[in-house]
Image (spheres, rainbow, N blue to C red):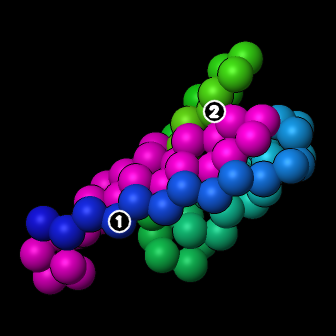
Amino acid sequence: MSNIKIHRDHHLGHAAARKIAWQWAEQVETEFGMACTYEEGPALDEVTFKRTGVTGTLKVTPHSFELDAKLGFLLG
């Protein structure tokens, strides 16, 4: 299995970052057939996504995005 980890700082604030994360989740559901769940929290939101060959999370804070994905053998 291959792993992808991406960390990006931002200055958007939590509300704007949350909006971008919702849009991203909708886009990957539509374009790539991902199943996404979105859990909001006071300091951290987490988008969990999966489909055949890919699982992962996108963590959203007021100051950063952190993507952690695990790719199956064929996608790795």
Residue depicted at x 64% and y 28%: 44
Q: Is residue 61 magenta?
A: yes
- Residue 38, located in which quarter of the rendered image? top right
Q: Is residue 16 magenta?
A: no
The stretch in magenta equals: 48-76
Which amino acid is tagged 2? Asp
Reading the image, the residue beneath label 2 is: 45
Most foreground residue, 52 or 24 = 24
Q: In the shown orientation, is residue 72 left or right of residue 8?
A: left
Magenta part, dominant SS: strand
Q: Residue furthest top?
A: 42
* 14 in relation to 24, above or below: above
Q: Quadrant of the C terminus?
A: bottom left
Question: Can you see residue 51?
Answer: no
Q: In the shown orientation, is residue 53 left or right of residue 33?
A: left
* 37 in relation to 32, above or below: above
Reading the image, the residue beneath label 1 is: 4
Residue 18, position in %: x, y?
Answer: 77, 43
The number of discs equals 2
Residue 62, position in %: x, y?
Answer: 77, 36
Q: In the shown orientation, is residue 29 left or right of residue 56?
A: right
First along the sequence among labels 2 and 1:
1
* 43 in relation to 1, above or below: above
Residue depicted at x 65% and y 69%: 27
Q: In the shown orientation, is residue 57 left or right of residue 30?
A: left
Residue 56, position in %: x, y?
Answer: 37, 52
